[in-house]
């Protein structure tokens, strides 16, 4: 993974022309977390923390993916969104 390319994608993700759907936002979040921190840890939020639970679940779907692969998928997704 090229760290500079990843950091540029993170910066670019904040300047998209239109706000992506919640599914895409969760995908971006989960790939980012997997690239930076690795597999999900801690307890899944419960109760009425629907947003926290959705983020946890999305990140958990990336479990086992190595950091470089997650970073590359993140970069590719941001570039795709920028092209739209």
Image: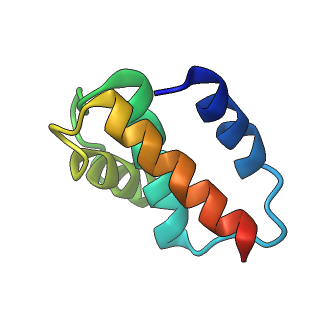
The quadrant where residue 71 appears:
top left
Q: Residue 45: image x %, image y %? A: 30, 44
Give residue 59's position: percent from left, percent from top. 32, 46
Residue 78 position, x and y percent, is 62, 56
In the image, what residue occupies the spot 29% across and 26% down?
38
Residue at coordinates 40% horizontally, 47% vertically from top-left? 30
Q: Identify which residue is drawn at 22% across, 53% down.
A: 61
Outermost residue toward the front in this view: 2
Relative to residue 8, is residue 24 depicted above or below?
A: below
The quadrant in which residue 84 appears is bottom right
Determine whether, in the image, residue 13 is placed left or right of residue 33: right
Residue closest to the eye, 22 or 73: 73
Colouring mode (rainbow / by chain / secondary structure / one colour): rainbow
Q: The N terminus lies in which quarter of the figure?
A: top left
Residue sitting at x 32%, y 55% = 58
When the figure is inspected, residue 7 is found, relative to residue 26, above or below; the finding is above
Viewer-side residue, 76 vs 10: 76
Query: How many numbered markers are drawn?
Result: 0
Residue 61 in the image: above or below residue 83: above
């Amino acid at each position: 993974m090229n760290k500079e390319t990843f950091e540029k994608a993170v910066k670019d993700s904040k300047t998209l022309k239109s706000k992506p759907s919640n599914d895409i936002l969760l995908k971006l979040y989960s790939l980012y977390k997997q690239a930076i921190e690795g597999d999900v840890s801690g307890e899944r939020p419960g109760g009425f923390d629907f947003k926290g639970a959705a983020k946890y679940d999305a990140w958990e779907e990336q479990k086992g993916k190595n950091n470089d692969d997650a970073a590359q998928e993140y970069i590719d997704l941001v570039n795709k969104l920028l092209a739209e």
